[in-house]
Image (spheres, helix red, strand yellow):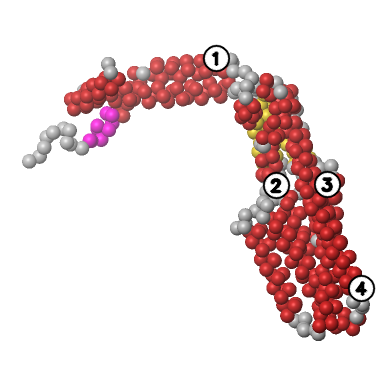
Amino acid sequence: MTSTDPQSSPPSPEDDEISLLDLLQVVADNLRLLVLGPLAAGLIALAISFAIPPAYTAITKFMPPQQQSTSEAALVKSLGALSGFAGSAVGVKNPNDQFVGFLKSRSLADALIDRFKLSERYDQKFRQDTRKRLEDLTKITNGKDGLIAIEVDDKDPVVAAQLANAYVEELGHLLRRMTITEAQQRRAFFEKQVSLTKVKLTEAEQDLKASGVNNSILKLNGAAVSAVAQLQAQITAQEVKLASMRGYLADSAPEFKQALNELTAFRAQLAKAEGTSGSPNADEADYLGRYREVRYQESLFELYARQFEVAKLDESREGAVNQVVDTAQPPERKSKPNKIQISMLTTLASGLALLLFIFVRQALRVAVRTPATAEKISRLRQAWVKAVGK
């Protein structure tokens, strides 16, 4: 038996056409609301935008300082096993990202707050709120061209330009303080190592002189002894490098693992060199041991002395210099608020909201005509009244 219930029959193309016509009819019936409503909202938003204080954006671009000059890099490269000590202490893979971090640091923000009295300017009671306000008004980007751009918003175009330029100036002050502090630490460390090694070298030379000079032994074993002494000095230098890396790297870091592998390789070379040096008699062994100690202390003293000179050179420098490409100038036009954009977006958003509203309202009106739906809506109203206690 075929059912004649219209609710159970599938919708026909005519039903789809009528539904579309119904939707168009709903739009036509509410056309005045859909046109005048968004226009009124856009005009109101435009009027409100005139009450928003204008803001001016000043922009400065600069190139951060290079990590090392060519002469310094060549000098450090010539140090052998210790060359990684200074480089790892001041070098980074992404220097521009590090400079952006410096620009966003609390120390630099506090310097700007004190310099421009930003707490009073932004009407903030707490310093941390002033930092947050400054952060919201500042945009710092690291471009693919290697330049860092700083954009600062302020109601006064002159102050906006001064703040943008002050970022670069305060970064230079911060870098100089950091460079001098780090160089002082390295200089003091290697100065102490040079003094200790010099004393040990003097003692080793005195011990060697006390035993006399044996040229025949040196001709046979001098080169091998010198090679062993240099390897021992490299191992000592590598151990110093690893000790320094533990201060800022985890043991699982690739740089630390590479340095550890280099130390293992040096030790393997030393074991091989000692295994092929032969077995001299007691007198020869004593003399060669003293000679090797002299050569070892000489190699170590040379490494420490060169690194000490690098540290002194870094300490004597004036500090890193930022190369400003575009100095911030007081902007002539305000950047915020964009009144036209605010008005257009408000008009568009309110139009979409009204269109959705009339469709939902029409759907509810149609649904109420169905007894089952009307009963559900009635129960929903009762539950709502009960929940709010009315």
Q: Residues within 10 Å of mark 2 (few under 14, many from 20)?
A: some
Q: State how many labels appear.
A: 4
| Residue marked by disc 2 | 95
Image coordinates for residue 157, horizontal then vertical, percent:
71, 23
Residue type indicated by callout 4: Lys
Dot 1 or dot 4, earlier in sequence = 1
Q: Residue at x 16, y 32 (%)?
A: 6
Image coordinates for residue 378, horizontal then vertical, percent:
22, 22
Decide which of 93, 151 is in the foreground and name it.
93
Residue 47's disc number:
1
Height in image: 119 above or below 309? above
Residue type indicated by callout 2: Pro
Q: Secondary structure at mark 2?
A: helix
Q: Are marks 1 and 3 in contact (CB under 8 Å)?
A: no
Q: Which residues are magenta?
A: 11-19
Q: Are marks 2 and 1 in contact (CB under 8 Å)?
A: no
> Of circles 2 and 1, which is in front?
2
* Mark 2 → mark 1, Cα distance in angstroms: 47 Å
Q: Residues within 10 Å of mark 1 (few under 14, many from 20)?
A: few
Residue type indicated by callout 1: Ala
Dot 2 or dot 4, earlier in sequence = 2
Image coordinates for residue 326, horizontal then vertical, percent:
76, 35
Quadrant where the image shows the N terminus:
top left
Residue 209's disc number:
4
Q: Residue at x 35, y 20 (%)?
A: 28
Quadrant where the image shows the C terminus:
top left
Q: Is residue 173 magenta?
A: no
* Mark 1 → mark 4, Cα distance in angstroms: 96 Å
